[in-house]
Amino acid sequence: MAKALDKINQELTALEEKVEGVNREIRGQYGEYSGLIAQTVKRQLVTLFYQISTHVYPENFLKLSLSERERLQQAIRDLGQTGSLLFEENLENPLEVPPEKKVDFRSEILKKLPITPEQLEKVRQHILKRKDAELAGEDSSSSEEFIVIGKLEDGEELELDVQSDSLDSDPLDFMDEEDDEDELTDEEDDEEEEEDEDEITHTLLVLVRWLKQVERGLNQVLKQLSQEGNQILIRARIFPSQVPSKVLEAAIQAEEGGATGNAPNLLNLLIEGGREQVVPVTALRLRLSELEFGDPMLARSRSRIRELNAQVKSLHKQYQQLQREKAIAEAEAAWRASWYEEN
């Protein structure tokens, strides 16, 4: 026997209030998160610039005059302020950002640089050798490994760190519900085409789209800050002169993969010169997962966001179930209204 229609309508009214409550809470939680990540990024930028300037390229930093060092440090502070404004703007007015495609780091680099069939064969042999070592029980990740993947315009070869612990690891996922949100949006888009939206459908649809835009915006802000930070290092002559901007851009755009540095939010590349000299390039690459891992308050805020996202999904499922029950109750009532017994 179907649930009474009055009872279903009461439950839908209660559900609408819950949806509104979660809507307010999750937006407020993102406000807290945006403020926290802005402060975290400010601190991280200072730490990362300090480490790159004093530990990775100390000789280049010492070549700068006092005024040049002061300009570099002021540029770091300005970049942190820019980040705060970008995070605030992303929250208040998230832009329509196209869905990010999973980018394989090596493939992206290969698109940027010429590579010969001989080099491809060298890469293949290197990978097979490492797999054989793993099967034999040897520790293939105890030392750094590099493979040449292309030549730069001046004839130098680019090598990529392929340590298994840096390329094969699965970093902390910061948005476990993203695929489910895609599914929710698709379902509601279909409903919108078929019939007018009710209040609950509209609220859920607007909320999910806002969540997706804010999350993608967060990643875009981090990529923008990383690129601008690396450009500051290039202009300040901290990076070696051989650093190719196109390789850095490809590395930052790659969503996952690449060789992580000794510290979070750093990316290691190697450029091998013609005289068998290896020039290390340690660049900025800010990532949500690493920022959250290093900041307990930011991690707690993300955890609460995940809980609220789970509530959104649960409320959507409850809504679908109640809509189904309502349709059944209305159909039964319509049947009884038109049915009569023949004498």
Image (tube, grey):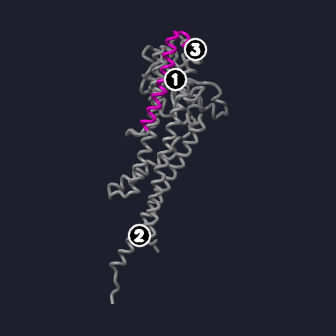
Q: Give the residue at mark 3.
A: 58
**Element carrying mark 1:** strand
Q: Which residues are magenta?
A: 61-90
Sequence-first disc among 3 and 2: 3
Amino acid carrying mark 1 in the image: Ala
Name above or below for residue 135 compared with residue 210: above
Q: How many marks?
A: 3
The amino acid at mark 2 is: Ile
Residue at label 2?
328
* Amino acid bearing label 3: Pro
Q: Nearer the viewer, mark 3 or mark 1?
A: 3
Q: Position of residue 7 (x, y in %)?
A: 46, 69
Q: Are marks 3 and 1 in contact (CB under 8 Å)?
A: no
Q: Which mark is residue 283?
A: 1
Residue 63 on the magenta segment: yes
Compared with residue 287, is residue 270 higher up or lower down, i.e. above or below? above
**SS type, badge 2:** helix
Residue 44: which disc? none
Nearer to me, 22 or 106: 22
**CA neighbours of label 2 inside 10 A, class few (<14), some (14 to 19), many (20+):** some
Q: Residue at x 54, y 13 (%)?
A: 61
Label 3 or label 1, whichever comes before in sequence order: 3
Find the distance from the CA under tag 2 to the CA under tag 1.
Answer: 60 Å
Q: Residue at x 38, y 71 (%)?
A: 330
Residue 107 in view (yes/no): no
Task: Name the chief secondary structure element in magenta.
Answer: helix
Q: Secondary structure at mark 3?
A: helix
